[in-house]
Amino acid sequence: MPTDVNAIIALSKEVAELSKKYESGAEVSKNEQNALVHAAEKLAIAVRDPDENMYNIAGQVSHNAAVRSAIAMNLFDFIPHDGSEITLDELSKKLGGANKELLGRILRACASTHLFEQTGVESYKQNMLSRAYLTDDNIPLAAQMYDFISHAILAIPEFGSQTDWKHIGDYTRGPFQVGFRTELGYMEYLQANPQRIKSWNAGMRLGRIGHRTSAFPFQKALELDPPAAEGGIAVVDVGGGRGQALEGIRQDYPDIKGRMILLDLPGVITDAKNNGLPQYIETAPGSFFDPLPQGARLYHFRRVLHIWGQQKGKELLENTKKYMDDYSRIVIADMVLADVGCLRDLAMQDLNMMSLGGMERSESEWKELIASAGLVLNKIWYNHDGPKHAVVEAVLPTYKGHKLD
Ligand SMILES: C[S@@+](CC[C@H](N)C(=O)[O-])C[C@H]1O[C@@H](n2cnc3c(N)ncnc32)[C@H](O)[C@@H]1O
């Protein structure tokens, strides 16, 4: 296929136009940022030959292997953070005599994808992309994706073929079971593999969904419809892990009145307590398919509904309904995918969840789920982080509390 010069010219102009906001120094919204990334990616595709585009995609598996090797060798730490270069000899010494050729080939692969910069035949330094890994969160998350979830993701085609593509898969029968050669759901699998559960729970403490940046106005909701003065429950964090969201809510809104309850499976609650759960958080060990604390103002679900497909999601919400009163709200912090033109990282995250038997939902799918459980969708909240960190708010049809703006 010949190069489409007109497409290249048009896309270059689009990129230049979308970059103007940066030149002007004005604040750039998430949507504007996404539009520029989208146009720049399309430009790169237009410029490459078709075969190169195919190889570029196929090579992403090797790219990930190079990054995971760099993590395993601790290169992100060993390559100086102050931006100075380091030679392969020096790195090899730091690694106790690692094979220099191996190191060089891994770093060459990384640098070819703009991760680290090659400064000479045998020297490298940090760059903008490698610095993205220098946070507490990102290296463990990247490692968890590669070491654990990738096995299930890579099994999506095999599972699809096995079922003649007639079954989307669910929690107990899907790509995860194929990839891990197990009959267990991934949580039961994690419980049976203590080393894995440790890093999984640690991974779950990471990320900012509903923490600090939550789009939902917790304080306002609780001020307008406060919990009962005596023993009233403000928030139950359902499937709340080690209490990370409750801690975040408390930090954001220290004046919130009422009890805060962490509900999760008994093993997770024990883990939370062993890791210094703050005193102000009460615990309710148990399953969220069983009875929940009654009459809380907010039933908070963060990154929980996405574990399940529509049927189990409906069961979970129907169970929650039984314990709500006319002033309770369900507050779901999860992604909300655009019905048309979904962003790449959200679409890929949906496949991650598909591999585990769950789903990231589009706006239509959220509406369908909420209605199927006999609830009313009050509002989908977005903040500057956009659809990745959205909050879906639902209430009973008999709701008597305030409507938030
Ligand atoms: C993806 S993690 C999210 C944790 C936390 N909400 C967060 O956002 O960081 C899902 C949580 O649901 C919990 N979970 C799974 N099945 C559960 C069940 N049947 N009852 C209660 N909690 C459950 C898991 O133990 C885990 O902590």
Image: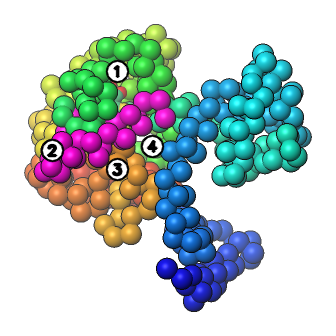
Q: CA distance from mark 3 to mark 4?
A: 19 Å
Q: What residue would you read off at disc 2?
A: 163
Q: Nearer the viewer, mark 2 or mark 1?
A: 2
Residue 260 lies in the magenta-colored region: no
* Res. 265 image quadrant: top left
Residue at position x 34%, y 48% from top? 351
The earlier-in-sequence mark between 3 and 4 is 4
Where in the figure is residue 201, as x and y percent of width and height? Answer: 44, 24
Q: Is residue 299 left or right of residue 39?
A: left
Q: Are marks 3 and 2 in contact (CB under 8 Å)?
A: no
Q: Residues within 10 Å of mark 1 (few under 14, many from 20)?
A: some
Q: What residue would you read off at disc 1?
A: 190
Where in the figure is residue 33, as x and y percent of width and height? Answer: 58, 67
Start-end of magenta stretch: 146-171
Q: Residues within 10 Å of mark 3 (few under 14, many from 20)?
A: many
Q: 339 or 319: which is nearer to us?
A: 339
The earlier-in-sequence mark between 2 and 1 is 2
Q: Is residue 374 visible?
A: yes
Q: CA distance from mark 1 to mark 3?
A: 21 Å
Residue at position x 66%, y 33% from top? 70
Ligand 1 resides in the quarter of the picture at: top left
Residue type at mark 4?
Gly
Residue at position x 21%, y 46% from top? 161
Q: 169 or 365: which is nearer to us?
A: 169
